[in-house]
Amino acid sequence: MHSAGKLLLAISAATLALIPASAPGAGAQETHSAAPVFNEQAIETLPAFVDGVMAQQIASRDVSSAIVTVVHRGEVILNRGYGFADFENRIPANGETTLCRPGSLSKMFTWIALTQLIEQGRVSLDDDVNAHIDFEIEPFEGQPITVRDLFQHTPGLSDVGGFTTTDEAELVDHAEWTRNNIPERVALPGQEVAYSNWGTSLAGYIVEQVSGESFATYVENHIFTPLGMNSSTFREPLPEGLIDRIALGHDLEDGRFTPRSFDYYSMVMPAGSATVSGPDMARFMIAMLNDGEIDGERILSPESVALLETNSIANAPRLPGMAHGYLVYRDAGPRLIGHAGAMRDFRSNMILSPETGTGIFLSIVAAPAGRPAQGELSAAITGRLFPQSPAPRWSETAEAEQFEGRYLVNRRDHSREAHPLQHAIVRAAGDNAITIEALGQTIYFEQTGPALFEQATGLREGGPFDQVEFYGEPGAWRLSFASQPFMNWHLVGPLEDEAAQDGEADGAGAG
């Protein structure tokens, strides 16, 4: 989760293969990607494998600490801490006690809370959100935002920032912040996925209005306590008993880690202010993989769990998209769903395989240069447990050149001039291959079907392999990455405009 000025800093080109998909999403056509399999034998050796990957990352990736938790068929397979939760005082990260901040992964608790109210008949997916709040959101071209739009990130809103601070005195209650920072309406609701932190904050606002409980209290009473997640909270500052257990963020100065101040996210609480532990996330994943129940305590009916997992909308016709709250990472072979999160210090991810009963949670603390480590670790574990082969290459028609140009992401603050980091440059690399330049890196893709390309560089054996699809009309192409189902890019200009963009980048300052 990020403010507008840092939008694509979280979408590192090195993590475009975060958890790539290999099969169709909602209403999708056949893809040309090889289906992965489940390597159950790798479960037994996974702890040693992760130990090795983490040793490399701590040595080379400016990672100060990490928590990695894996469950399989109701059992905890791995729950370990790596590195130092407090580097200055040499306090090791402890898988049992160290706390981490999952960022936008917090949203899954918000979607569960709202789904509980749907299950009770107090809210409906197709309700106008205005039916459940005490302020008015004007329709856009006569069409209101629905509860369904919040779940699938299709409210048609501009992105907004300004909701984080390091000064406790600057905190504003999230309900007040939500009421006073309604984003610009820029598109019809329900048409295109463009990730919205404000939309999730509004979902939490609805939970408060309908239940009569504050959001933090509601989640404690109806999710955390029933699941036995006794070290988890949305509250900021952290309560007594938890504050001394949090992993500290660090900068890297002159080769040494120096501690950073705590970032407050509670102005947009339902979208990202949770704090959790590895054992708590293990219990959460086991419950969600067991139809909403653990140790006789149920937070959702099996039907409601199935609703959260059900495909809703996808930007690209042949790539996975959104479920209801979950991101769909793969839609077959076996299906993978989950959610990631990024804060200034923490990079986190949760990946669930309902078919195999497997859940993966990881949260890495790294200096800025080490932020790709989360994507790399996610890919390493996924490739180990769910390996796949590269898709057959396609060469029937020379298509690559028609997709060349400068593309602009749809998730941005539309009231401001687009930042160069919000662009991607697509170039043909032969008749049936392309390169995509983003954030100073270049990724090479080879064609596997009409307007469909698969990542061919920077990969481990067994994948995962990211895909990119172009769709729309010539001259008005849109592109989506399988690894980023929550947004897309629109063609805004030819390659000859790149010189102007480079000039803007040269003059662009930080922030």
Image (cartoon, rainbow, N blue to C red):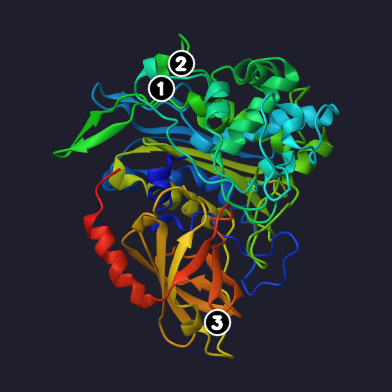
Q: Earlier in the sequence, mark 3 or mark 2?
A: 2
Q: Earlier in the sequence, mark 2 or mark 1?
A: 2
Which disc, if any, is residue 246? 1
* 3D distance between C-alphas at marks 3 and 1: 47 Å
Residue identifier under label 3: 393
Q: Image point 82% across, 26% down: which residue?
A: 122
Q: Image point 62% across, 20% down: which residue?
A: 215
Q: Are marks 3 and 1 in contact (CB under 8 Å)?
A: no
Q: Earlier in the sequence, mark 3 or mark 1?
A: 1
Q: Position of residue 169 (x, y in %)?
A: 38, 15
Question: Does dot 3 land on a helix, a strand or a loop?
Answer: loop
Residue identifier under label 2: 238
Q: Are marks 2 and 1 in contact (CB under 8 Å)?
A: yes
Crowding at mark 2 (Cα within 10 Å: few <14, some 14-19, many 20+): some
Q: Quadrant of residue 27?
A: bottom right
What's the residue type where badge 1 is placed? Answer: Ile
Is residue 151 visible to the viewer in this orientation of the structure?
A: yes
Q: Position of residue 448 (x, y in %)?
A: 57, 78
Q: Nearer the viewer, mark 2 or mark 1?
A: 2
Q: Is residue 481 left or right of residue 254?
A: right
Q: Image point 66% across, 32% down: which residue?
A: 203
**Depicted 45 relative to depicted 256: above or below:** below
